[in-house]
Image (tube, rainbow, N blue to C red):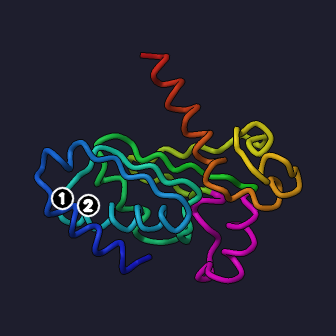
Amino acid sequence: ADKEAWRLAFEIATMPPGARANLTLVGHSLGGRITARVLARLAEHGLKVRQAILMGAAIPVNDPDLAKMGRASELPVLAVCNPKDNTLRYAYATVGGEGSVAFGANGTPTPCENVVECMVPTNITREAKIDGAWAKSKVLRDIANHHEKFYLDYVRRIVGKNKEAK
């Protein structure tokens, strides 16, 4: 994921400024980690995209790129976190957590510049509209609640409310 972030940051940096200005990056889990790293690389070069949305980002809460990422976004970066995300709370912390809890599970203990944290509601697994086995099994929804559809459902709600307010 970290290698891919360097490649994507280079690709975005070489885009025409107008194209970058209209670009919104969205990443879930490792995609959120990639998005944070891309933003940090762009910030180091004074480049910006329109906006970024990180959903359940699998990146350590103490990672230095988190402090940089907001400087590479015209609009605030939305960091959608779920303190009850069992994958990030348990599997990430045990297997790939790099000695730290995941940003996408708990948010950050100190505010990041131009980053707005959005905590999903505690009942998101019951309210999200999803299909297949996820829709049929309450246990599956509660245990494996890192599924991107739970995060996307919440992002859709936020975007919908913002459109209604305008």
Quickly name the residue at label 1.
46
Q: State yes or no: discs 2 and 1 in contact (Cβ < 8 Å).
A: yes
For the record, the magenta segment spans 85-106
Q: Residue at x 47, y 46 (%)?
A: 78
Q: Nearer the viewer, residue 72 or 161?
A: 161
User: Is 101 covered by the magenta stretch?
Assistant: yes
Of all residues, the one furthest to the front in this rendering is: 132
Residue 8 placement: quadrant = bottom left
Label 2 Cα crowd, 10 Å radius (few <14 / some 14-19 / many 20+) = some
Residue 132 location, x and y as percent? 75, 50
The residue type indicated by label 2 comes to Ala
Q: Main secondary structure of the magenta part?
A: helix
Q: Residue at x 55, y 35 (%)?
A: 156
Q: Residue at x 76, y 61 (%)?
A: 144
Badge 2 element: helix
Marking on residue 43 = 2
